[in-house]
Image (tube, rainbow, N blue to C red):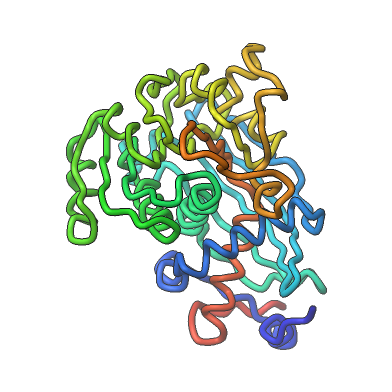
Amino acid sequence: MSNSLYSTARQNNQTTIVPSTDIEAAVEMADLVPAIEAAFAAYENDTAQMPPKSYIDLPQHNGDFRSMPAYLETDDWEASGIKWVNVHPDNPDEFDLPTVMGTLVYTDPESGFPLAVMDATTLTMKRTGAAAAVATDHLAVEDATSLGIIGAGVQSYTQLEAISQVRPIESVIVSDLDDDRVQRFIDTFGDEFDVRAGTIREAAQCDVLSTVTPVEDPIVTLDDLGEHTHVNAMGADAEGKQELHTDVIREATLVIDDFEQTTHSGEINVPWSNGDIDESDIDAELGEIVVGNAPGREDLSGITVFDSTGLAIQDIAAARIVYESLGDDSGYRLEMV
């Protein structure tokens, strides 16, 4: 499964340095969503390797680091690499930096040669939106036209960009404690969609809901949700975080991305550790649904929840899109000695 771009880079001993501006230009959601779906399929089909995400906790800096290596093989391509990512919530106020930043080393599986070192901050946002789109495609009602978003930070933008690829979204309700962030979101998408500010309940009544907040006290109740709302629970990515009340998790059809990660640091980590839910409450992993080993949405009514922690296979699939898109025409070259 040799790749000519990989071979050229090896022969020339050149590693491409890819800044975030190039990633923004290289990644089209129309290409990324099916690539992320293929990554979920590879994971389910045992043609991917993904050791558990490892953490370095730094409470003295109100932050942490995570390392995320992976290899995956599909019918058409293979890819490998590792992402090093941080989460420091104080960054915007103290250092004028994003809360989440990352660097990804994309490697040739055949030789181990470092093909590219790329900014993974934008990449992470893009692949997170694409993962929500894959889940939405399998779990939301077919004619979903309304999207609610709770949390108007940077992740909210790719939620709309990606989900609108798989459903005919017309109206968007965004809820956030920060009015300025809500207005920036409205200004960004107001020409494409009917976008307005709303309460948590108004957002949760939509056909699809994405929650992208860092809260530890749940903010969405079962009564808030519509009778067929599909929820992408994207915000919980560390122990103690939880956006949905436990009764939502118990009552919904619950789909997760990975058992080890979600029980440790996903939306279900708190009720799981408290003993409020167990394996019987988990209906499927998303990869099972993608390959047809488990059903997606079967009824017009009923709440579905996707618990997303973010998988290294998603990052590597996204990095491949970037690398293939750039080819030899962009980025900076670092010659290996």
Q: Quadrant where the N terminus lies?
A: bottom right
> Which residue corresponds to the image point at 43% horizontal and 35% vertical from the top-left?
228
Q: Compared with residue 163, is residue 16 higher up or lower down, i.e. above or below?
A: below
Task: Provide residue 278's location: percent of width, then percent of height.
Answer: 69, 20
> Which residue corresponds to the image point at 18% horizontal and 36% vertical from the top-left?
179
Q: Foreground: 77 or 105?
A: 77
Q: Compared with residue 23, is residue 147 higher up or lower down, i.e. above or below?
A: above
Task: Provide residue 62's location: percent of width, then percent of height.
Answer: 48, 28
In terms of image quadrants, where is residue 56? Answer: top right
How many marks the image carries: the answer is 0
In terms of image quadrants, where is residue 211? Answer: top left
> Which residue corresponds to the image point at 35% horizontal and 23% vertical from the top-left?
224
Q: Quadrant where the C terminus lies?
A: bottom right
Query: Is 291 situated left or right of 156 in this image?
Result: right
Task: Provide residue 82's location: percent of width, then percent of height.
Answer: 67, 56
Q: Is residue 124 visible?
A: no
